[in-house]
Amino acid sequence: MANILVTGGAGYIGSHTCIELLNHGHEVVVFDNLSNSRYESLRRVQKITQKHLVFIEGDIRDADHLDQVFQSYSIDAVIHFAGLKAVGESQAMPLHYFDHNIAGSICLFQAMKRANVFHLVFSSSATVYDASNISPLHEEMPTGMPNNNYGYTKLIIEQMLQKLSAADARWSIALLRYFNPVGAHTSGLIGEDPQGIPNNLMPYLTQVAVGRLEQLAVYGDDYDTIDGTGVRDYIHVVDLANAHLCALENRLSTQGCRVWNIGTGQGSSVLQIIHAFEKVTGIKIPYQVAPRRSGDVATSFSDNQRAVQELAWQPQYGLAEMLADSWKWQQQNPSGYSSTQHKYK
Ligand code: NAD
Ligand code: UD1
């Protein structure tokens, strides 16, 4: 059992990870400024697990506040989710993204060092791979310059952490490169709750299905793929959350900095997703083909063997379960968490 600080723990992936941590006997301290989440997600995490966690509303750019947290709770390791993730917004507001993601991460790592906490799991992304790599992508393939500022912040933080661990052997760092997280906890109580119009395929699709949005635009049907539409490696968020637990346990006993892909190793096209969703839910999805989205690659899926072998991790959920759980969450919470406004104090 360890005391884990979870930055960004009220968000989509963080809240699912809190469940896995609590269910495995860890003590959880969530530190989140709620800029893209609500406390309600954590209230529901505690309802699902019947366990208590500590919530602190705070910003990772606030060094004094972080010092206070490290002093008050005897933290053994940090899982660092906090950050901004909207690709379009990152293009419009680069400094804002550099500040939250890069400066915020540096502030956190400095506070960890002051507190003598050197175990870290970091949320990275498959977006750091060079676009010329051919899938399946494996960890030794070259990274490239991401074509958006969000992806750039992930690459910079990865590189900083690699240099940090090379310079100081006390650090033990997991860089998890997520592929495409989808789905929700099987209870339907927590899930992805994007603000405004979603950018990503799955929340867009479920919002069309629930009638919040009119129709789905399929960005390009002339790629060199099975049916011309983009292929991605969708992974159930509960499997992804579990990967954090496995990576944490690995890092608590090993030093250095190690990269792991977290995906299923299977690619699905946009049309395959639409048709599978229709089959699972019985709902017809209105869609129309639109031009390609700038910055998209045709195909991206993982070679996940390093995580399977080294972390003793194995994805448990297939596409049908990912779609069913995304839909269950959306159906039970058509407006996300916004209809419930429990204050934590
Ligand atoms: P999310 O927005 O749901 O969660 C991020 C959380 O961080 C939110 O609760 C937000 O309030 C908090 N936060 C943001 N800035 C903060 C700050 N300065 N101080 C404290 N808290 C702050 O996003 P998510 O989908 O759960 O993603 C979690 C992490 O995984 C992010 O770092 C994201 O970039 C990364 N990631 C996500 C995906 C994806 O598709 N969802 C893919 C690859 C990587
Ligand atoms: C996108 C981001 C990536 C980020 C990731 C997680 C871009 C170019 N890439 O990845 O940097 O790490 O989200 O936040 O924005 N699609 C449609 N219609 C839609 C939405 C998506 O056809 O309305 C297609 C896309 O063209 C793609 C697939 O669905 O082929 C998946 O898209 P998405 O869910 O946005 O994920 P990525 O593009 O992989």
Image (spheres, rainbow, N blue to C red):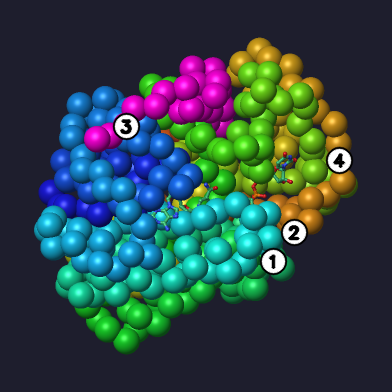
Q: Which mark is residue 343?
A: 3
| x 86%, y 36%: residue | 289
| x 51%, y 34%: residue | 193
Q: What secondary structure is marked by label 1?
A: loop
Q: Which of marks 2 and 4 is nearer the N terminus?
A: 4
Mark 1 Cβ inside 8 Å of ligand 2: yes
Q: Is residue 29 magenta?
A: no
Q: Which of marks 2 and 1 is nearer the N terminus?
A: 1
Q: Which of marks 1 and 3 is nearer the N terminus?
A: 1
The answer to whether residue 280 shows anywhere in this view is: yes
Quadrant where the C terminus lies? top left
- Looking at the picture, which amino acid does disc 3 mark? Lys
The foreground one among 73 and 99 is: 99
**Label 2 sits on residue:** 295
Which residues are the magenta region? 318-345
Q: How crowded is mark 1: few (under 14 residues within 10 Å), some or many (20 or more)?
A: some
**Label 1 sits on residue:** 147
Q: Residue 290 carries which label?
A: 4
